[in-house]
Image: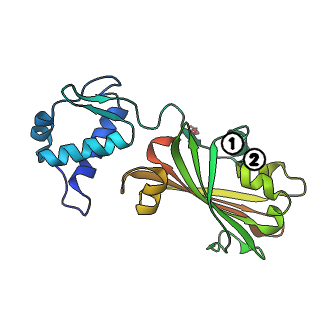
Amino acid sequence: MFERIPIPRYVQLADVMRHRIKRGIWGRGETLPSIDRLMQEFDVARVTVRQAIHLLAGEGLLSPQRGRGTFVTAQPGGQRRLSVQTTLDDLVEMYRGDTPDLSNIVESQATPILTERDGFAAPSYFHMRRVHSRDGENYCVVSIFIDERVFNLAPDRFRREVVIPLFASLPGVEIVKAYQTLNIAAADVEVARDLRIAVNAPVAEIRRVFTGSDGSVIYLGEATYRGDYIHLEMDLKP
């Protein structure tokens, strides 16, 4: 069943099991099939099943109980999801009033890598790498580059608040162009550590760029979300 790719079989099995829980095939409170049945269904060794269960138990999705079986304890991503917005106003409104727990794990002066489409670089940037969490669950890690001229208008607020609505509220700061891209990818070792997920678990990478009135990039955000935290919905014009 599983491909011969450089991803451990137990990680591939855990991904299949995670999606079954997400789709409600195995509902919260239910008992998983026995290890022997899982071995037979997926044609894997006992140790592979045990490793997959251990991985999902670490994510809070399963609870192995000696003598009773393995119980489904949660659904991936909980109830809250991030909708991917298609206008700047909608994006700002989505984040306005949002108060996740923020942990700044890196602060530095660093220059972002920009493309021709982005615009030209500001004289200097303040860089933060932070993790967003809610109810103890890490769901996003983001690398943020802020034009230092803008950052110095409200350094304390930038450190403790969600950046996008703060940008929109600062007097004298004009966003004349904004765009974002979204890619589906797999978690590398660093992202897996920060989000507490398995290496190669599905993630969504969102890159957002704001350009100021002088054509310079005043904000670049490179965010990686757990794959089960993203909901994409767009109106289709007939």
Residue 115 vertical position relative to residue 207 in the rendered view, above or below: below
Residue 45 vertical position relative to residue 183 in the rendered view, above or below: above
Q: Where does the image place residue 159, in percent across and percent down from the top left?
A: 73, 55
Query: Which is more toward the observer, 237 or 155?
Result: 155
Upstream in the sequence, badge 2 or badge 1? 1
Identity, as a three-letter code, of the amino acid under mark 2: Pro
Q: Are marks 2 and 1 in contact (CB under 8 Å)?
A: yes
SS for callout 2: helix
- Colour logic: rainbow
SS for callout 1: helix
Q: Where does the image place residue 82, in percent across and percent down from the top left?
A: 56, 41
Q: Where does the image place residue 195, in percent across and percent down from the top left?
A: 48, 51
Task: Indicate which disc residue 233 carries.
Answer: none
Instruction: Check disc 2: other Cα within 10 Å, few if <14, some if 14-19, many if 20+.
Output: some
Task: Indicate which disc residue 165 carries.
Answer: 2
Residue 186, by quadrant, is bottom left
Residue at left offset 35%, top offset 31% = 23
Residue found at the far bottom of this picture: 123
Total marks shown come to 2
Q: Is residue 161 left or right of residue 2?
A: right
Q: What is the CA distance from the residue labelled 2 to the residue labelled 1?
A: 6 Å
Residue 184 appears anywhere in the view:
no
Residue at numbered disc 1:
95
Residue found at the far right of this picture: 172
Identity, as a three-letter code, of the amino acid under mark 1: Tyr
Residue 124, by quadrant, is bottom right
Instruction: Check disc 1: other Cα within 10 Å, few if <14, some if 14-19, many if 20+.
Output: some
Residue at left offset 83%, top offset 63% = 152
Residue 237 appears anywhere in the view:
yes
Query: Which is more toward the observer, 5 or 105?
Result: 105
Residue at left offset 67%, top offset 70% = 108
Query: Which is more toward the observer, 126 or 47?
Result: 47
